[in-house]
Amino acid sequence: MKFGIDKIGFYIPKYYIDMRELATMRGIDPDKFTYGLGQDEMSVPPLTQDMISLATNAAYNTISEQDLNDIDLVILATETGSDFSKSGSTSIVSLLGINPKSRCIEIKQACYSATAALQFAKNHLQSNDDKKVLIIASDISRYGLDTSGEATQGAGAVAMLITKDPSLLVLSDKSSYFSEDVWDFWRPNYSDTAIVDGHYSNEQYQRFFNQTFEDYKEKYDRQNSDFDAFLFHIPYTKLGRKTLINYINPSKEIINTFNQSTLFNRKVGNIYTGSLYLSLISLLYNADLDANARIGLYSYGSGAVGEFFSMKLVEGYQDALDPNLPHQFDTREKLTIKDYESMFTAELVSDGSHMILPDDNETFQLKEIKGHRRYYQKN
Ligand code: CAA
């Protein structure tokens, strides 16, 4: 039986900044951000869009009324959780009206956990093949104003519906994974910004790629030329490009496909768990691949876990894509760097007091915090 991605969609906040303007404000050559890091714009979330509302909006953009009844497992993959106990997916199930006879969890392993969720989903469907699994990868990437990581922030969520006989991509059983205790990037419970050893994290990302890709090829007797496209976790697009060039010796076609797979990421920035899957969406919307094209995917989560795995495109996949989804980019509002800084430093209450947030006119938003509880609203 075949399992894989039947639907995929995303949601990004309605605000963004221009990376060249950010560089100028910080006294940095703008080419460093656009060419050196490969980022043009960066999504900025208002206080009304937390990880849970981003995730709910992404799922709303992706699934149908029928899917609400058929889903019986919801996995929220995130490293921006707001609660150590209650999973964000319990809020999402009620906000969207998903069948309450569902299992709901939130999982964490830095930017890797949505990939683990995919494998869990496949296993679940093997014994529940009339059901569907909703996976949402949702994050807000924060390093702090005027830090070396500032240019690699971002915010957004990707939702995927995993089913039997999917319309978009079939997930292969073949996979190679590798884990090791590495302190390259982490965020202690008491901090709302990440701690990172930037250059070391780049080295670990590439070392884990080499480890998992070589292991995959050896285990399954595969060659570089067996793949029609390579997708990467994209903290910033230049790192994916460097890894592709350094380890794969790519053809012009493969480089061209890689460029198409990073068009959306260049405009959004790092969305941690969703970054690899936003790159997949960018590929599906911007490249023209044949049915049965084999796509190699590299997932990396600092700390660290890496996995190389593959999917095959389904015949007629283009017909299963919602043509309106990318229009989100057309309606975004550009912020000045000063306005971005104010948005970045705005804080939700954490002392149990009552806070009411303004309407933001997005489909779902955080509306109120009262007695340490978060309340969401559908606009
Ligand atoms: N014109 C063109 N290019 C320029 C330039 C200019 N004027 N100035 C610099 N550059 C180039 C540099 O040559 C360099 O390119 P190479 O990587 O090809 O050498 C690139 O711009 C970046 O320059 P620096 O290395 O000097 O930049 P930096 O020291 O300020 O930091 C960073 C870059 C380490 C990525 C930093 O932004 C950071 O720490 N980011 C967060 C960590 C991160 O994203 N790590 C990725 C791996 S970990 C992971 O993937 C998990 C995750 O999501 C966090």
Image (cartoon, rainbow, N blue to C red):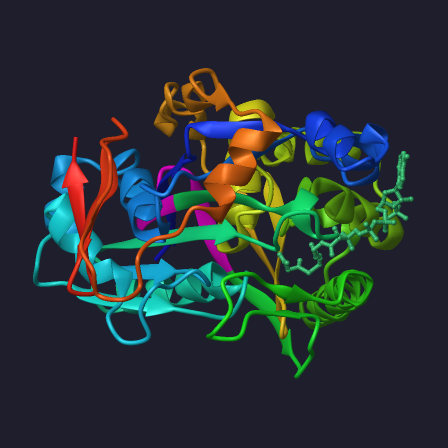
Residue at horizontal 47 percent and vertical 16 percent from the top: 330
What is the span of residues highlighted in magenta in the rendered image?
159-172
- The answer to which of 251 and 82 lies nearer the viewer is 82
Q: Residue 2 falls in which quadrant of the image?
A: bottom left
Whole-percent x, y for residue 202 in the image = 78, 60
Task: Name the residue located 50 percent from the left edge and 55 percent from the top edge.
Answer: 273
Residue 328 drawn above or below residue 306: above
> Residue 164: within the magenta?
yes
Of residue 292 and residue 285, the one placed in the foreground of this image is 285
Residue 282 visible at all: no
User: Which residue reaches farthest bottom?
Assistant: 181
Residue 218, located in which quarter of the rendered image?
A: bottom right
Could you tell me if residue 78 is visible in this image? yes
Above/below status of 300 relative to 182: above
What secondary structure predominates along the stretch shown in magenta?
strand
Q: Nearer the viewer, residue 377 or 274?
A: 377
For residue 207, side relative to residue 297 (left or right): right
Identify the image quadrant of the N terminus. bottom left
In the image: residue 360, left or right of residue 112: left
Q: Residue at x 30, y 36 (%)?
A: 62
**Quarter of the figure with the C terminus:** top left
Is 4 on the left-hand or right-hand side of 25?
left
Query: Could you say where residue 257 lies in the image, as x and y percent from the top left?
Result: 69, 32
